[in-house]
């Protein structure tokens, strides 16, 4: 997958990346409430450039030419031998039904074939349309080409891809203290240095983040990434307020940090 596509991703309930405020980009902190903040305003500049944050091997990646042909396979009558797609008429499943406590769901034959077949890299078009509408509605985001969604098999895959693109053994990464063990399991084998930022009931403490950055600067160390779980933080359970998010964001702007926001619990917490 083209890394630049993932870097533009704004995934509901998953991982998303936010760049510095000096060039306000389309990927911003999600507000915890319904009020509109300065971080929800439209970008004032062109599409932000994330190239400086990418690892060398990530910059060398290119989109798969086979995957680029996938949309063409939807042309009626098109038969391709290039992508290795199985004949959907040979799928062994003819129907699929789900029974919930208060409803029953059934896939149409077309939906079932699409679900069992290879799809575009970002995900099934119908699912992407639904998630894009959800993102736009929940976060009052205008639907533009400046942001997109890429479906992952759970937020852990999104974290793994982001970590692989951004972090190397020479990096110092700022993280919540305490932070999610699953992310630590991904970062520690890389050999990067992890610097914990103390948290309270509202998540990462801005003053501690600022002081840690100044301390590292005095040692000649420049972190590029800060990782945080803003909602129902695992394991502390803290949830950042909108005001706290803006404080963290402004510090990230000042220090040119990329925020890796891991937000799988947005629709599951009681805040």
Image (spheres, rainbow, N blue to C red):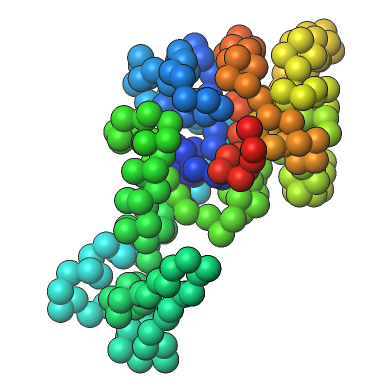
**Residue 158 visible:** yes
Vertical placement of 143 versus 70: above or below? Answer: above
**Residue 170 visible:** no
> Where's residue 182, x and y in %?
76, 49
| Residue drawn at the location 17% of the way across and 69% of the way down | 75
Q: Quadrant of the C terminus?
A: top right
> Where's residue 80, x and y in %?
26, 77
> Where's residue 109, x and y in %?
30, 80
Question: For residue 125, which quarter of the picture?
Answer: bottom left
Nearest the eye: 62 or 135? 135
Q: What number of labels is visible? A: 0
Nearest the eye: 251 or 105? 105
Q: Is residue 234 left or right of residue 138?
A: right
| Residue drawn at the location 39% of the way across and 17% of the way down | 41
| Residue drawn at the location 56% of the way across and 59% of the way down | 153
Q: Is residue 120 left or right of residue 18?
A: left
| Residue drawn at the location 37% of the way across and 88% of the way down | 94
């Amino acid at each position: 997958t083209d890394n630049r596509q993932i870097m533009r991703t704004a995934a509901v309930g998953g991982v998303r990346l936010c760049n510095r405020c000096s060039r306000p980009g389309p990927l911003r902190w999600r507000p915890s409430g319904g009020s509109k903040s300065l971080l929800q305003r439209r970008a004032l500049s062109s599409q932000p450039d994330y190239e400086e944050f990418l690892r060398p091997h990530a910059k060398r990646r290119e989109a798969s030419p086979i995957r680029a042909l996938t949309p063409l396979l939807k042309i009626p009558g098109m038969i391709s031998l290039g992508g290795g797609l199985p004949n959907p008429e040979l799928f062994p499943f003819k129907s699929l039904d789900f029974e919930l406590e208060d409803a029953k769901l059934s896939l149409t034959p077309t939906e079932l074939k699409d679900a069992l077949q290879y799809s575009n890299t970002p995900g099934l078009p119908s699912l992407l349309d639904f998630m894009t509408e959800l993102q736009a509605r929940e976060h009052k985001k205008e639907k533009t080409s400046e942001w997109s969604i890429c479906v992952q098999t759970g937020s852990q895959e999104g974290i793994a891809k982001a970590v692989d693109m951004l972090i190397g053994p020479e990096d110092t990464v700022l993280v919540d203290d305490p932070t999610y063990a699953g992310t630590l399991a991904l970062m520690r084998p890389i050999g990067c240095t992890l610097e914990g930022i103390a948290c309270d009931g509202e998540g990462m403490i801005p003053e501690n983040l600022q002081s840690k950055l100044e301390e590292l600067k005095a040692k000649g160390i420049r972190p590029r990434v800060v990782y945080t779980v803003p909602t129902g933080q695992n394991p502390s359970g803290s949830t950042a307020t909108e005001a706290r998010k803006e404080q963290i964001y402004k510090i990230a702007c000042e220090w040119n940090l990329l925020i890796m926001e891991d937000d799988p619990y947005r629709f599951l917490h009681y805040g």
